[in-house]
Amino acid sequence: MNQNIQEEIEQYKQKPPSESTDFYINEVLMHDFTNAAILIAECFYDYYQTGELVV
C-alpha cells in the first residue's frame, strides 16, 4: 500500500498545480490547519488551568 501511495505522490509532483489545487492548499488547508492549532492551544490552556486534559 505504501508503494502505491508513494507512486501517486510522485505522479502529482510532476504535474503543474491546477487552480483548484492552489485554492485547496491556500484556502482550505490553511483554514483547517489554523483551526487545529487553535483547538490544541485551547486544550493546553484548559490543561494548565484545571490539570485535566479534555478534548
Image (spheres, rainbow, N blue to C red):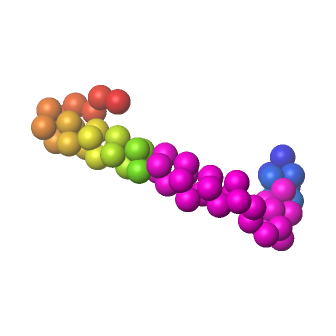
Residue located 62% across and 52% down the image: 24
In this picture, is 47 found above or below 34? above
Residue located 29% across and 46% down the image: 41
Side of 50 relative to 23 (left or right):
left
Residue located 16% across and 42% down the image: 48
Give the residue at the far left of this rendering: 49
Magenta stretch holds residue 28? yes
Tell how many labels: 0
Front residue of 41/20: it is 20
Quadrant in the picture for residue 36: top left
Do we see residue 10 in this rendering?
no
Q: Position of residue 51 (x, y in %)?
A: 17, 34
Q: Position of residue 49 (x, y in %)?
A: 13, 37
Side of 2 relative to 34 (left or right):
right
Image quarter of the C terminus = top left
Main secondary structure of the magenta stretch? helix
Q: Position of residue 50 (x, y in %)?
A: 14, 32
Range of magenta residues: 8-33
In this picture, is 42 found above or below 6? above
Front residue of 35/23: it is 23
Q: Position of residue 46 (x, y in %)?
A: 20, 36
Residue located 49% across and 54% down the image: 30
Side of 5 relative to 44 (left or right):
right
Magenta stretch holds residue 25? yes
Give the residue at the far front of this rendering: 19
Quadrant in the picture for residue 35: top left
Do we see residue 35 in this rendering?
yes
